């Protein structure tokens, strides 16, 4: 069953989730990093730097910088494509999956608190 939210309610949900995410998770990902992470985990692989840059409408260096940070946090890993060494394949990690599972749980929790 679809949930109908007014723009104000939708923004209130986003606000509540963002505030709680900053409070509980010290990784403090940017909106771009979260968008990349969601793309990697919600859309079937393979994922490449070039492909992510095209989807997000940014340059490959922008994706590389975001992946550097997310790699340092253990949320993704990168490997060279054995068939085409020019490509870098982005892989999921257990920590990344757990991060998004907790984020999903947080969204559900905050959604239940909405006055609908």
Image (cartoon, helix red, strand yellow):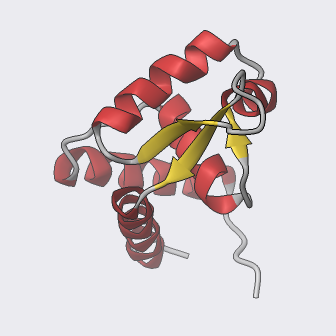
Residue at image location 58% in from the left, 15% down from the top: 62
59 relative to 21, above or below: above
Residue 18 visible to the viewer: yes
- Towards the viewer: 2 or 89: 89
77 relative to 61, above or below: below
Task: Name the side, left or right, on which 91 lies relative to 58.
Answer: left
- Towards the viewer: 84 or 57: 84
Residue at image location 39% in from the left, 55% down from the top: 17
Estimate the x, y position of residue 101 in percent, counting from the top left. Answer: 42, 69
Q: Quadrant of residue 72?
A: top left
Residue at image location 40% in from the left, 68% down from the top: 110
Task: Name the side, left or right, on which 75 lies relative to 65.
Answer: left
Task: Name the side, left or right, on which 31 lies relative to 50.
Answer: left
Image quadrant holding the C terminus, namely bottom right
Task: Tell which residue pokes out farthest to the bottom in this image.
Answer: 1
Estimate the x, y position of residue 3 in percent, counting from the top left. Answer: 70, 76
Task: Tell which residue pokes out farthest to the front in this image.
Answer: 82
61 relative to 82, above or below: above
Task: Name the side, left or right, on which 73 lies relative to 97.
Answer: left
Estimate the x, y position of residue 82 in percent, counting from the top left. Answer: 68, 39
- Towards the viewer: 39 or 74: 74
């Amino acid at each position: 069953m679809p949930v109908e939210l007014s723009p104000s309610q939708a923004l209130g949900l986003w606000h509540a989730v963002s505030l709680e995410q900053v409070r509980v998770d010290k990784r403090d990902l940017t909106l771009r990093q979260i968008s990349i992470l969601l793309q990697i985990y919600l859309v079937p692989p393979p994922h490449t730097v070039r492909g992510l840059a095209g989807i997000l409408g940014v340059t490959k260096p922008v994706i590389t910088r975001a992946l550097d940070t997310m790699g340092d946090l253990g949320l993704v890993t990168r490997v060279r494509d054995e068939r085409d060494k020019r490509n870098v394949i982005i892989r999921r990690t257990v920590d990344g999956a757990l991060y998004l599972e907790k984020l999903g749980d947080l969204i559900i929790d905050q959604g239940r608190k909405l006055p609908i």
